[in-house]
Image: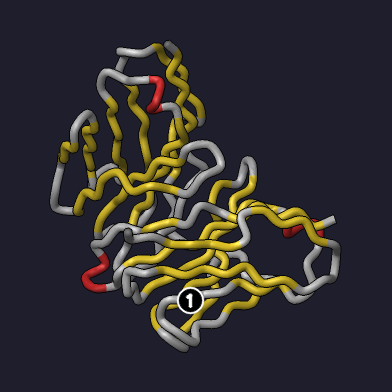
Amino acid sequence: SQQGEEDPQALSIQEGENATMNCSYKTSINNLQWYRQNSGRGLVHLILIRSNEREKHSGRLRVTLDTSKKSSSLLITASRAADTASYFCAPRPSGYALNFGKGTSLLVTP
Amino acid sequence: EAQVTQNPRYLITVTGKKLTVTCSQNMNHEYMSWYRQDPGLGLRQIYYSMNVEVTDKGDVPEGYKVSRKEKRNFPLILESPSPNQTSLYFCASSFTTGGETEAFFGQGTRLTVV
């Protein structure tokens, strides 16, 4: 199945700094989605970027997509302690399956 | 409020005792799926359903069953649970139209099989 691989596995930054995490995948996609998971809770959808888009913004989130490199990045600007969570990408080929990788664990310290 | 509801949230059971984890969504979604999440392995899909009476295996279906008799409900059945099924389970749902839709997740069920 088409899974994303997030990198790095863990990231620790201070409040106010930017956090960047990356996602790589292997086959062609229809869109790519990013989700956040607070400790032990359900995933929450953050943003969807279509295969014909290169960049998308939502509040403090910026997502880029490079289909030639089969990669995406999620940038969180001006991080807050509340951003501490795991972040997952889900590259979506045609069809409806959402397959997740192992995620990036982000820790934002005050 | 749009939501996916799983029950129970926590469950401790013994090996071999059949159990069912329920999942219900109130958004009229066609697509529903189950995942398990284990440390170091991420989220893995167990089963999914495209609509009523249509189910299919995900990546790790062994030891699980599902049914989709009604659109809103998608229970996960463990006929004979074993300790290697100790995990955190999530149900998710989404519309299928166009494939460009977000998934909504339940709050999770933490299952321990002893």
- Badge 1 sits on which subunit? B
Left or right: where does residue B30 sit relative to residue B15?
left
Residue A70 in percent (x, y) is at 30, 46
Quarter of image, res A30: bottom left
Camera-nearest residue between B56 and A14: A14
Above or below, B24 relative to A17: below
Residue A64 in percent (x, y) is at 22, 38
Q: Number of marks in the image?
A: 1
Which amino acid type corresponds to the residue marked 1 in the rendered image?
Asn
Secondary element at image label 1: loop
Residue B66 in percent (x, y) is at 58, 78
Q: Which residue is mark 1?
A: B73
Q: Residue shown at 46%/36% (left/top)?
A: A86
Residue B68 in percent (x, y) is at 50, 82
Left or right: where does residue A28 sit relative to residue A7?
left
Which residue ends up furthest to the front in the rendered image?
B1
Q: Residue shown at 42%/38% (left/top)?
A: A87
Looking at the image, what colour scheme do you see?
secondary structure
Left or right: where does residue A88 sit relative to residue B2?
right
* Residue density around tag 1, few if under 14, some if 14–19, many if 20 or more, within 10 Å: some
Split into 4 quadrants, where in the image is the C terminus of chain A?
Answer: top left
Q: Residue shown at 59%/51% (left/top)?
A: B37
Quarter of image, res B109: bottom right
Above or below, A107 relative to A72: above
Camera-nearest residue between B68 and A65: B68
Above or below, A102 relative to A18: below
Q: Residue shown at 55%/82% (left/top)?
A: B67
Camera-nearest residue between B73 and B32: B73
